[in-house]
Image: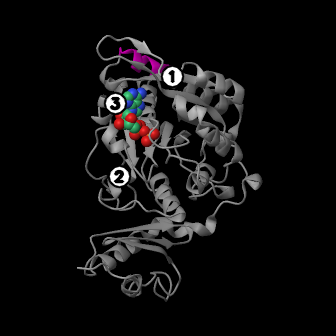
Amino acid sequence: MSAPTEAQILAALKKIPDPDRAQDIVALGMVQGVIVKDGHVMFSLEVDAKRGGALEPLRKAAEKAVESLPGVLSVSAVLTAQKAAAPAAGQRQPGTGPAGGPNAPGGKMLVPGVRAIVAVASGKGGVGKSTTATNLAVALSQKGLKVGILDADIYGPSQPRMLGISGKPKSPDGKTLTPMENYGIKCMSIGFLVPEDTPMIWRGPMVMGALEQMLRDVAWGELDILVVDMPPGTGDAQLTMSQRVPLAGAVIVSTPQDIALLDARKGLNMFRKVDVPVFGIVENMSYHICTNCGHREDIFGHGGARREAEKLGVDFLGEVPLDIAIRETSDAGTPITARDTQSAHAKAYRAIADAVWSKIETGTKAGPRIVIQ
Ligand code: ADP
């Protein structure tokens, strides 16, 4: 059966009225960015940020209306609040607005109860950003901190797999989602919300809508630190995220090759552009440990990241070797930091966690910038 056209989707959505206004959601121009791919349908509903929390039933009704069309395999609708978009970076105010509203002045989202949000980012995919985010979160939690992890890697969410969590988050009150949990870490991922076979073609505003929901509509509770596993790269979506999420700082993960290719530098510049402090660089797959004899091989040369960090004026947070034990544990949902607490790798991640936490503590004392109300 062939998939419906955009016109057919809009016709179905025309039957849904906005509960607070006399017209339907299509006539009001709320339906944006309709994407149809092999029977999978995605679109966003642009709403006023103030109404966001109350419009979940509308979002569900819109999804249902499209689901009932012949040829539709899945539907994802996200609420977006583009009207409250951030002004240019230079005009931004620190995120210290009144608590209660979803956004602080300057378009920043507020996450009450969360002391510091830290982004784990990379200039490109496949460098071990998610693995680092997971092990960093576990190591921080082993320090006795209350830790959450937000998988914002909308294009390829890995946290459900890496933390060994499956199933769907519950919503006891019908408004907020309860985060999933393992290893004492609260976790929310787009991977829990979108079926695995849904193509991940999200446009900028849709990415922001999903991220906004994961920050605002999740009952994170009191957290010392929320680690955000960012989507790889330094495009518009990443830039907007770095601008809208009140980040205390960023950790950049790179491999020795990508340091040579300057991808790490792009990541660094992106955060600088939006005034987010870069806590430092982690060199992943830094050297190789032979599975048979334990011999260490500096395949890509050694010390490049440390030198590059020095040159760029940021801290070098540590190095993690390329070791099959890291791949196996991370892909099996048993992060090495939790599984083998005495291993050299676990120690390396704990040292990185110590460095990151001390940056947060210093920053918290230094000013109100990262105290999120
Ligand atoms: P990214 O988030 O940058 O795309 P991932 O964390 O998903 O990267 O890692 C990509 C793959 O490399 C995964 O299979 C992961 O288990 C593996 N990996 C990551 N870091 C290491 C490492 N230090 N040693 C061995 N394998 C690793």
- In the image, taking residue 10 as reference, residue 83 lies left or right, namely right
Disc 3 CB within 8 Å of nearest ligand 1 atom: yes
Query: Which quadrant holds the N terminus?
Result: bottom left
The answer to whether the residue labelled 2 contacts the one labelled 1, judged by CB atoms less than 8 Å apart, is: no
Q: In the image, is residue 74 above or below residue 90?
A: below
Going from N to C along the chain, the mark reached first, 2 or 1, is 2
Question: Which amino acid type corresponds to the residue marked 2 in the rendered image?
Answer: Gly
Question: Which amino acid type corresponds to the residue marked 1 in the rendered image?
Answer: Glu
Mark identifier at residue 191:
2
Residue 372, image x, y percentages? 60, 44
Q: How does the figure colour the protein chain or chains?
A: one colour
Q: Secondary structure at mark 3?
A: helix
Figure quarter occupied by ligand 1: top left
Mark identifier at residue 319:
1
Residue 224, image x, y percentages? 51, 34
Disc 3 target residue: 327
Residue 346: within the magenta?
A: yes
Residue 236, image x, y percentages? 60, 56
Q: CA distance from mark 3 to mark 1?
A: 15 Å
Question: Which amino acid type corresponds to the residue marked 3 in the rendered image?
Answer: Arg
Q: Secondary structure at mark 2?
A: helix
